Amino acid sequence: MAETLKKGSRVTGSAREKLAEDLKRKYDAGASIRALAEETGRSYGFVHRMLTESGVVLRGRGGATRGKKATSTTPA
């Protein structure tokens, strides 16, 4: 979707379906939700909702996580 949408404008009907398909295709190709939000001029939440409504399985968060630290397998 080359043009940005007016922030806060309602997207309904065939335009919504087209946007959802476009977002899904780009997300599946590796684009982040934040990048898609920036590109379309919409919020992160809007893009997230459009993707989940489209049935997209969202990727996990990248970067550092606060999980249990991995233990080293090499002797010290």
Image (tube, grey):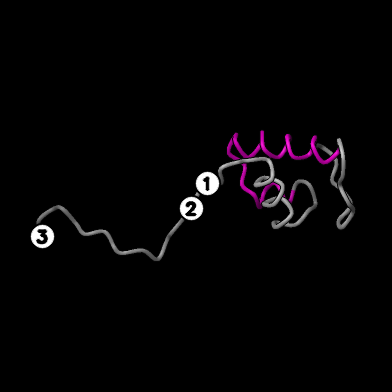
Q: Nearer the viewer, mark 2 or mark 3?
A: 2
The front one of 60 and 74 is: 60
What quarter of the picture does the N terminus occupy?
top right
Residues at badges 2 and 3 in contact (C-beta under 8 Å)?
no
Circle 2: element type: loop
| Dominant secondary structure, magenta | helix
Q: Which residue is mark 2?
A: 62
Which of marks 1 and 3 precedes in the sequence? 1
Dot 2 crowding, Cα within 10 Å, few <14, some 14–19, many 20+ = few
Q: Is residue 62 left or right of residue 15?
A: left
Residue visible at 13% across and 53% down in the picture: 74
Tell me if 60 is positioned left or right of 44 in this view: left
**Residues at circles 2 and 1 in contact by the CB criterion of under 8 Å:** yes
Residue beneath label 3, please? 76
Under circle 3, the secondary element is loop
| Image vertical order of residue 13 relative to residue 69, above or below | above
Residue 27, x across and y down, in percent: 63, 40
Magenta span contains residue 20: yes
Q: Position of residue 4 (x, y in %)?
A: 84, 45
Residue at 82% of width from left, 37% of height from top? 2
Q: In this picture, which residue range is highlighted in magenta?
A: 15-38
What is the three-letter code of the residue carrying label 1? Arg
Q: Which residue is mark 1?
A: 59
Q: Nearer the viewer, mark 3 or mark 1?
A: 1
The spot of residue 58 in percent (x, y) is 56, 46
Please tell me whether mark 2 or mark 1 is closer to you in this view. 1
Disc 3 from disc 1: Cα separation: 35 Å
